[in-house]
Each structure stands twice: as C-alpha cells, then as structure tokens.
Amino acid sequence: MTAPGPLNPAIAVTPRPPVMEARRWLQGVAFPAERPLINLSQAAPAEPPPEPLRRAMAEAVLNRADAHLYGPVLGRPELREAVADAWSRAYAGAIRPEEVAITQGCNQAFCAAVQTLAAAGDEVILPAPWYFNHKMWLDMQGIRAVPLRCGRGMLPDPAEAARLVTDRSRAVVLVTPNNPAGAEYPAGLLRAFLDLARSRGLALIVDETYRDFDSRPGAPHDLFADPDWGDTLIHLYSFSKAYRLTGHRVGALIASPARMVQVEKFLDTVAICASQIGQIGAGWGLAHLQDWLAGERAEVLARRAAMARGMSALPDWRLEGCGAYFAWVRHPFDLPAPELARRLVAEAGVLLLPGTMFMPGGDAEAARHVRIAFANAGAASIAALIERLRGFRP
C-alpha cells in the first residue's frame, strides 16, 4: 500500500472501526444454504422505518422546501421543543428547548460534548468495557481514556472512579443500558456518579442510546429532577434505534444553555445542521409511534430473554451482562477472543466481536470475552446460535 503522506499521529494510532474490520473477516468465506451466516456484530436495526414514518418523510421531501435547506445549527425548533417536552414528562424534570441540541447521530453528540470539555492531554473516565467509538474519539483528540473496570453485574463503582480522578480529569462517561455489556445502571448508581462528578468539578456524560429498550418500567433515573442538573449532566440520545433512522443520522444532546453556546460552534463547523428529513422523521415518530415503539421494545426484551435462556444451556460459557441489544460473554477456550471470533466465522457461520475491541490493549480479560449483538436475531436465529456454539470445538 502506498504511503499516504503526512498523517496526524493521533489518527494514525487509532484502531480501524471494529464493525468494518469484522466485516472484512467475511471476505472469501462461503456460507452454505443449510448454515447461513448469523451476523451478531452490529447493534443497529436491520429494517427500514415503519411505513407511516416513511410516508411522512416522503411527504416532506415532496412538499416542504425547508426540508432541503440548511436549518438552525442546534436543530429544528419543533423537534427541540418536542424533545424538551417528552423528556420533561418522562424524567419528571424541567428541560427547556434551549437545553436541547439535535445532532447528526448520537456519536456526533458525544464528540460535541467532549469537544466542549477537554483538550489534548486531558483525561476522561470510561467504564471498561467501553463503547469503542467513544474511545476512538478520545484517542483522535489526544485525550487519555482512563479505564474504570466494571465489577459484579458489569456495573462501575463510583468509589473506584473517585480514586481515578486527577487534576487532568474532565468527565465521566456512562452508557445505560450499556454497550457492550448490556447492563442497566440502577438509578441510585447514576445519582452517585452525579454527586461524584459535581463534587470534583467534572461533567457526567450519560449516553442513553438504548433507553427505549430498558426492561424497567418508568424513568431509569431522576437526574433531571435535580434543579441544578445543568451544572454537571450532559445527556445523549439516539433516534436511530427507536425509529430505525440509522441512515438519517439523528441524535440529541441535552445540556445547559451555557454549554450549548460551545456545542453550537462545534456543530456548525462539522455539519452545520443535522439532516432535515431525519429530523422531520424523528419528530413524527415522537408524536405518532409510541405504541409501535412499545411493540419493538417488547420484541427486543423477548430476544433478551431467549438469549439468557440459551446461554444458560451452555455451562462452559458465562453470561456476564445481558440487556437492550447486547450480551457480554466469557468464552471457555484457551485462545484469544480475536482468533476465536475469526474461527467462529469460518467454522460456525457466526459473526460477533471480540472483547479486545472494547477494552485496553493487552488486557487479559478482554481476550476471554465476546460481545453478542442479538437484537436483530429472532428466536430461531438465537436457537441456531446456541447450537453452533455448543458444537464448536477449537
């Protein structure tokens, strides 16, 4: 391969995107009709939005001139108002439209939040295993990701996080329900992290991309009921999973108006505005698809239950976390997870991601784990997965 010329060293040392790397493992591998590939590598809806939502978006394409133009950098006013109203009701809090920004997906919301908080040489605490795109962005910015190892139930410990805080710390990041571990963080745990962050002058970034598939009834936490939440909390959300809008890239960031001034600078520079069609679709979904979304949640929770039952029948495999779209599993073999993942493709027709994609380099525990993204797998596919894992012999 020809050398590309000058390279930013922070970009050069950042690993390639894990899901794209895993897809390359499929090249040259044939999957017979009687044993088709079971793809459990990516946490994204595999089907288009429901037809009524597509029709609403198509109508906007045909009849709304503003759907094709630049919009406000922080998002369409009606969508910001709808998010503020829906979140205020859901969390029994007080959120104003000026505290909401609409972003090009939740990844961009995370990037915007971090860009307002930290610079090269600073530190951000990430529970490990972590969401790899969070780590990649920190690496690209020269910001040190400080791993906070999760314990029982794949939950991070606020007391351990407190011991990791230094004068270079700027934020703690939590993802709940978690990617990749599936853990649903208790409300009290989130409150403890908010108290820690506030006491140490840090931001608490809470990514709730998979909130709509939380198994618990009601609000998952009460952080927005705190009248001073804006001094510490930054909340992230994705419309992609709820309404199957992955290709339209619509996310949300909720933070104080003072931080929004800084967020606007970042968003204007990298995208100007989120997709107008996607924003129109997200707003329509919020207004009209809550019953449909409840059905989607029920189906994902049924798949979660099927995954837990199936793994319980494999005594040599240990299910350490399971929720929303993901299972975090300790495998029983004396070979590293990357090698296991490649062999599962070729020998079992299963594509999943090794734990090494979610943890610090050289971590021995990473090599013993895999992430299984089961949300797109129906009951028959989950049953087939269990049988293939049962029959696999390295």
Image (cartoon, rainbow, N blue to C red):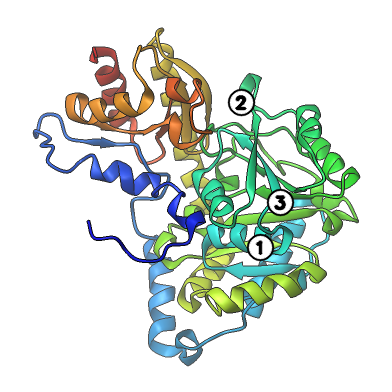
The residue labelled by disc 1 is 115
Instruction: Locate the C terminus by quadrant.
Output: top left
- Mark 2 or mark 1, which is nearer to you? 1
> CB atoms at circles 2 and 1 under 8 Å apart?
no
Name which residue type carries label 3: Asp
Tag count = 3
Return the x and y of residue 134 as percentages of the image width and height: 56, 49
Give the camera-side residue of 53 and 111: 111
Q: Residue at x 53, y 69 (%)?
A: 284
Name which residue type carries label 1: Gln
- Find the distance from the CA under tag 2 to the CA under tag 3: 26 Å
SS type, badge 3: loop
Name which residue type carries label 2: Met
Q: Is residue 73 above or below residue 85?
A: below
Q: Is residue 372 above or below residue 282?
A: above
Quarter location, residue 330: top left
SS type, badge 2: helix
Image-based side of 159 in relation to 135, left or right? right
Image-based side of 313 in relation to 172, left or right? left
Of the numbered discs 1 and 3, the one sitting upstream in the chain is 1
Q: Residue at x 51, y 25 (%)?
A: 363
Return the x and y of residue 310 as percentages of the image width and height: 39, 18
Check disc 1: other Cα within 10 Å, few if <14, some if 14-19, many if 20+: some
The residue labelled by disc 3 is 122
Q: Residue at x 40, y 8 (%)?
A: 316
- Find the distance from the CA under tag 2 to the CA under tag 1: 28 Å
Give the camera-side residue of 260 and 334: 334
Return the x and y of residue 273 as percentages of the image width and height: 55, 78
The residue labelled by disc 2 is 154
Image-based side of 364 in relation to 164, left or right? left
